[in-house]
Amino acid sequence: MGLWERAYLPEILRGLFITGGVFLRNMFKWMTGRKGALTSYYPEETRFDYAAGNRGKHILTQRPDGSPQCIACNMCATVCPAKVIEIEAAFDPQDMAHPKYPARFEIDYSRCVFCGLCVEACPEDAIRMVKEVPNLPATDRWNMWLGKEELLTWQPHGDVAKPYPPAPKGDRA
Ligand code: SF4
Ligand code: SF4
């Protein structure tokens, strides 16, 4: 630490100058109705410029026949530090390649900390997090439980790594 930094006061003034500059710039943009102010009125306004690595809403990936890629191994639920993933496994003897599948797959977003460990733990690339976060806020915590159908059928534009079957009618792409 140099002498200038050890004096503290110049650094404090420099910090105040930077913070004040950003504040006045945003205030001016807001007062003149310009876009670009750093604060968004979420959820009425949603940002379009999420960082590429932003961890947003989860999706469950599908096989070409539309079935979930998930094999209900429970690894994501086990590794989840917030314990917000609930999976009920079922067995399909007709499907020799993937006999186990999730009859129920739910995530409680009111307690998810968006750490991404579930995605890292999955051996099947069956769960992903995309940068978009549509419709996550709610005034009732029970509305923040997302089920298998929503996780499976939501096809965000941000997820280009895998082609999906055609979206069902009425899907919020
Ligand atoms: S992002 Fe983290 S907290 Fe959220 S469901 Fe995945 S492992 Fe759990
Ligand atoms: S999403 Fe992945 S880790 Fe979680 S149960 Fe399915 S296959 Fe296993």
Image: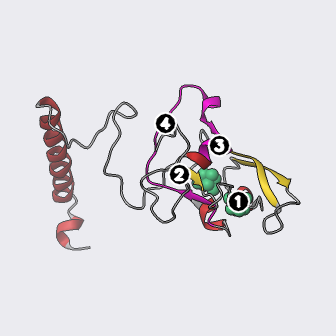
Q: Secondary structure beneath disc 2?
A: loop
Q: Determine which residue is flagged by label 1.
A: 70
Quadrant where the image shows the N terminus:
bottom left
Sooner in the amino-acid sequence: mark 2 or mark 1: 1
In reply to whether residue 134 is colored magenta, the answer given is yes
Which tag, 1 or 3, sits closer to the chain's start? 1
Depth check, front residue: 59 or 109: 59
Q: State yes or no: Cβ of the residue under disc 1 lies below 8 Å from any atom of ligand 2.
A: yes
Give the residue type at disc 2: Pro
Up-down relation of residue 160 to residue 148 (above or below):
below
Q: Nearer the viewer, residue 14 or 156?
A: 156
The location of residue 75, given as percent across then percent down, is 73, 62
Q: For marks 2 and 1, give the one nearer the viewer.
A: 2
Identify the image quadrant of residue 92: bottom right
- Residue 52: percent from left, percent from top: 38, 61
Binning the other alpha carbons within 10 Å of mark 3 as few (below 14), some (14 to 19) or many (20 upward) gives some
Q: Nearer the viewer, mark 4 or mark 2?
A: 2
Pointers 2 and 3 in contact (C-beta within 8 Å): no
Q: Secondary structure at mark 1?
A: loop
Q: Which residues are magenta?
A: 125-151
Q: Determine the CA span between mark 4 and mark 2.
A: 22 Å
| Residue at 60% in and 62% down | 119
Which residue, given by chain and number where applicable, does mark 2 sit on? 166
Dot 1: within a 10 Å radius of its alpha carbon, few (fewer than 14), some, or many (20 or more) residues? many
Which one is earlier in the sequence, the residue at label 4 or at label 1? 1
Dot 3 amino acid type: Glu
Name the front one of labels 2 and 3.
2
- Mark 2 residue crowding within 10 angstroms, few (<14) / some (14–19) / many (20+): few
